[in-house]
Amino acid sequence: MALVFMSSCRVFNPSEMFKTPRNFSYDEFQSTVKEYVIRPYDKIKMTVYTNKGFQLVDMEEKIQMNQYLPEYLVDKDGMVKLPVLGKVKIDGLTVEQTEKLLETKYAQFFRDPFVIVSVTNRRIFVFSNGAEKGNVVTMDNRNFTLIEALAKVGGMTSFSKAYRIKLIRGDLSNPKVFLIDISSIDDLKKANLVLQANDIIYVETRPKYASRFVNELSPYLAMLTSILLVYSLFAK
């Protein structure tokens, strides 16, 4: 019975998520990307000042009021619809590149425009101990890395596999899946990558066969014990 149960992953690891085939071909990282890149379905807030913001005495107050500004959604084609300009393609640009692009475009309408852009829906989903522990983490800086995300959720457990961390990115109907190893310093240099909004981080875990085996069999053992007890009483 033990061998039968052990051979079934669905019995002993039913909560496992994002399982890939044995010979699955993982995607390769672009090592040149070191800053956050705007993607479709990101939401941005934008503030435009004239004269490079120099003559705005209350500029700090206006920046603090940024939370009340409207949000603009980056469509699936990478375009965002903005006041005056209409649709502008910003997919694939960093926040700084987007600000410079918009300053150039707004220069047709304003004198020395100064643009501030922020991405407002930057969050990721971290499963640091398989499916047992999930967290929604807000990305609080532009270059938010995998190591920061894991630190935010308290690191990993003794059952977590530091050499098998899956990063799932993009459209869930056709996502990119990356396999990351941070078990050594050499691997860490390649793994401290900048995350994107809505990334899913899944740290695989070692199966807890012993405890799950006991949990699965304990009801049957209890039933068998009861039957034997009743039988022993009547047998007398």
Image: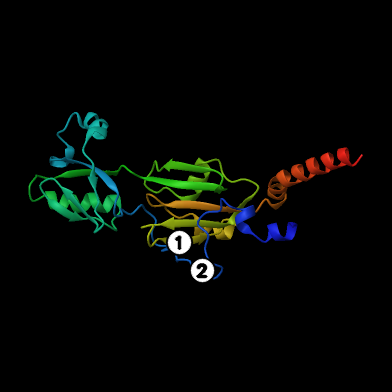
User: Which residue bears the numbered disc 1?
Assistant: 177
Left or right: where does residue 11 sit relative to residue 167? right
The answer to whether residue 206 is seen in the rendering is no
Amino acid of disc 1: Val
Verify CB contact (< 8 Å) between mark 2 and mark 1.
Answer: yes
Q: Residue at x 50, y 43 (%)?
A: 134
Left or right: where does residue 6 sit relative to residue 204? right
Q: Residue at x 52, y 46 (%)?
A: 150
Q: Earlier in the sequence, mark 2 or mark 1?
A: 2
Percent position of residue 175, x then y: 40, 60
Give the vertical position of 60 relative to 26 (above or below): above
Percent position of residue 197, x then y: 37, 49
Percent position of residue 165, x then y: 54, 56
Q: Estimate how packed mark 2 is, as few (under 14), some (14 to 19) or many (20 or more) residues with alpha carbons within 10 Å.
A: few
Dot 2: element: loop
Dot 1: element: strand
The answer to whether residue 234 is seen in the rendering is yes
Residues at marks 2 and 1, CA–CA distance in whole angstroms: 10 Å
| Residue 24 tag number | 2
Q: Residue at x 29, y 58 (%)?
A: 92
